[in-house]
Amino acid sequence: MFGGAPLYLCDGRLKSVKVTTERLEGSRVGFDMVFEQAEVDKAMDKVYRRLVNKVNVPGFRPGKAPRYMVERVLGREAMMEDALNDILPDALKQALTENADLELIGEPEPDVVSLDPLTVRLVMDVMPTAELPADYRNIRVAVESVSVSDEELNRNLAMLQGQQTKWRFPEPERAAQLGDRAHVDIQGFTSAGPLTDKVQHDVLDLNPAEEGGNVLPALLEGVLGMKPGDDKDIATTFPEDYGNEALRGADVTFHVKLVELQEPEHRPSLDEVAQQEGDADAAALRDRIRGEITKQREERARTKQLDEILRQLNEQVKIDIPQALVQDGIERRVKELEERLSQQKIKLTQYLGYLGKTRSELEEEYRPEVERDTKTSLVVQSFAQREDITVSDEEAHAEAEHTIEMAIKTTLEREDIDMAADANDTTAAIASEMIADDGTAAEANSDSASADREEQANAIRARLMPMLDEDEFLDGIRTRLLNHKIEERLLAIANGEEPPLPANSGGEATTDSSEKSEAHGNDEASNDTNAEGTALTPTALAEQQQTAGASQVDGTQEAPAASDSPALDPTNAPTSAQTDRAKEQNPL
């Protein structure tokens, strides 16, 4: 097909263009197109008719000048360029019908080589193919073991106790001390200016980190000893691994005013906390919290194992990444960063000012990561093809129905409409939005004891079932199932389980029927999740705390970013309970 062999294309009446296709380095392809003069004249006539009424040609009434005079006024090359814009798309389309294996990327770069005959050189990026090595199934990666120390468990239990503590104003008024709750007006400043546009109100629990505290040490020490009404500037440097990437390593000065102070009136025992949490006693509470932390860390270990598998696969594959793909990925990263910063009331220009960088420098910093992730995406797609991993229409519809049923179940069980979906699971989010928009969910969450829950479920189901015919919803389902299948196959290979090769790989054929519904087991926990793990500024932390009605002001590590790969995203978000109670300590 390639190698310079000419390709003759017809428009049904005559051979109008001759195309020669050539593979180039860097995942590019060149099309050399030679147009017959009759086709060029026809295109030029079309341009002439379009422009003749708009051109003022001396000695001729509007629209009456002959073509050669219009060409003299406008220039033949300019009109030829317009003509080329008319005929080039059809010529390219015809060329691609004979090169069906090509997937073009980005915009064409036409270069007019000659006007007589009209000869055009068209160079474009094409989607490359990642060639996996023959022994890719020899990769072995062990999963890390996880554990939860008693110290970590006690710290999480202390945070729960803090959330259920009753507070009072100390009498007589005194200075802040450990164990208090401080209501402060706070605003952070860097050398580039304020972190937020205005002063915000935060609530800080003044406990050291080892006792369930979650305030930056410098901020904690600075507030201790202040009395209501006092103002103070407190300087600190954020850790390099701080969850909020906009503040990593930043020197910040907080201007703090202590508005009011509270002390514990009653700090519940663990048995009391267990009762509020629905556990039998303190021992059951400890077991459950330990289990949640363990599960979260197991998911992180699984993600780390997948990352290492993909890293090793990447090392074994040589591939030219089109720069058009890389640039798209960079722009997407910058946009995502801008959106995250916007949620924290920080502008991208402010963030760049904190770092002392330009936008171009930021983009160049993203480039190696984007190139790696783009390569990973291509490798994963090749892996899925090599392993013959697919999702049938039957699987997609079954999983779509399961997702809808889980959405209904979650809605009926909640007092609020808060179906916070997994960050990597857009399908549950779509269901949530439809429920909220419809208003049926409000009825479903009614406190009326006489309400018929089955009737409520049917009402919601009637509104959601049409989603089964929506391409966006089903595409999300297919992607999720495909991700799950790829992950499971990669892990099985890395664990040495030797899953059978598909028939088209030259090995033993496999039906692989066991995979068709295995994703359901993980979806029960993920349909009702909130993967927001990004550490916030003091302002956003206070808003989060007040919304949750808790005393916790946590600065967790940022959740892993989702992969750009359309075929695999190994990130597995924790449940909301895990996120709240089993966070890695990086305190504000």
Image (cartoon, grey):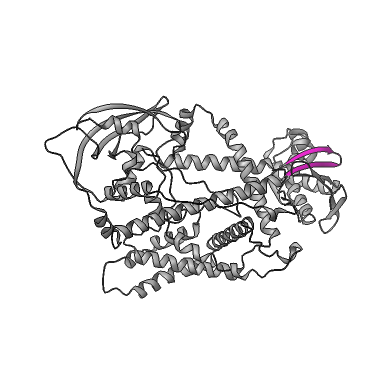
- Where residue 188 sits, quadrant-wise, is top left
Residue 83 visible:
no
Residue at the far top in the pictured view: 191
Estimate the x, y position of residue 16 in percent, counting from the top left: 84, 51
Quadrant into which the C terminus falls: top left
Residue 253 visible:
yes
User: Was residue 167 drawn as part of the magenta stretch in this picture?
Assistant: no
Name the chief secondary structure element in magenta: strand
Q: Nearer the viewer, residue 205 or 18?
A: 205
Q: Nearer the viewer, residue 501 or 41?
A: 501
Q: Say above or below: 276 vs 63.
A: below
What is the magenta range?
109-124
Estimate the x, y position of residue 407 in percent, counting from the top left: 43, 65
Q: Is residue 405 left or right of residue 76?
A: left
Estimate the x, y position of residue 65 in percent, counting from the top left: 75, 39
User: Was residue 117 drawn as part of the magenta stretch in this picture?
Assistant: yes
Estimate the x, y position of residue 452 in percent, counting from the top left: 32, 75
Residue drawn 60% across the image and 33% down it: 364
Residue at the far left in the pictured view: 172
Q: Is residue 14 left or right of residue 364?
A: right
Q: Nearer the viewer, residue 93 or 181?
A: 181
